[in-house]
Every structure is written in structure tokens, then in C-alpha cells.
Image (cartoon, grey):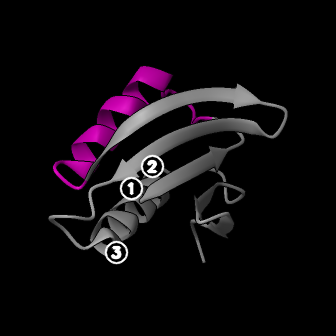
Amino acid sequence: MEMIIRYPALPEGMTQKDLEFQLADTLDDGGWLLGAGADAEGNWLDVELEDEKNNPKHAILAVKAYFQSAEFDPKTTIELAGKPVGIYE
């Protein structure tokens, strides 16, 4: 299952590499980063969730919790199957 994370900006003091490392650590065996970049809509991360071994809901909740604890902008969204949901919803 593919998940797209869109965020307006990184929290103060965080680099893109910090984000990628911390997200990989958060996902552990629950998924992996496919790509990252920026477009007209802002910054994005493309994540593949491992759904054969683990329930993807656990990874989704872990990602939301990570972005909340890192104090990302409230406009940050997690998109699954084309439907974006705010990280604070």
C-alpha cells in the first residue's frame, strides 16, 4: 500500500535527511521510503507500507504520531488511495 505525505515545510532545525532517517526508524519493518521531493503543491514523501506481514494501520498510526510529535505544520497530510487526511484528524 502506497502512502503519500505532503508537508508545507520542515520543522525548525530539521533537515530533509533527518526526516528521512527518523521516518525510516519509525517505520522499522512496517514500510520504507520510495522517494521524496517537491512540486507545485509543496514537499512530499512517497512511502510503501508493508502489508503482507503487518497490518498497515499500525504503520499509518505510527507515521501520524511521528509527524505530530515532530510538530509538523497542521496542513501536513497523509494520502492513501488518493484521499488526503490531516495528521491531526
User: Mark 2 is on which residue type?
Assistant: Ala
Q: Please identify the quarter of the rendering in which residue 39 is found.
A: top right
Q: Nearer the viewer, residue 4 or 11?
A: 4
Q: Nearer the viewer, residue 75 or 83?
A: 83
Q: Farthest residue to the right: give it.
A: 40
Q: What residue would you read off at disc 3? A: 57
**Under tag 2, what secondary structure?**
loop
> Who's the residue at 41% across and 21% down the image?
17
> Who's the residue at 48% across and 60% down the image?
68
- Mark seen at residue 70: 2
Mark 2–mark 3 distance (CA, rounded to whole Å): 20 Å
Q: Farthest residue to the front: give it.
A: 52
Q: What residue would you read off at disc 1? A: 66
Q: Position of residue 89 (x, y in %)?
A: 60, 78
Look at the picture and state if 13 lies above or below 79.
Answer: above
Mark 3–mark 1 distance (CA, rounded to whole Å): 14 Å
User: Mark 1 is on which residue type?
Assistant: Tyr
**Under tag 1, what secondary structure?**
helix
Q: Are dots 2 and 1 in contact, CB under 8 Å? A: yes
Look at the picture and state if 19 lies above or below 74.
Answer: above
Q: Which residues are magenta?
A: 10-30
Q: Is residue 43 rendered to the left or right of residue 18?
A: right
Q: Residues within 10 Å of mark 1 (few under 14, many from 20)?
A: some
Q: Is residue 6 magenta?
A: no
Q: Please identify the quarter of the rendering in which residue 59 is found.
A: bottom left
Q: Closer to the N terminus: mark 3 or mark 1?
A: 3
Name the front one of labels 3 and 1: 3
Using the rendered image of the protein, determine whether residue 15 is visible from the camera's viewpoint: no
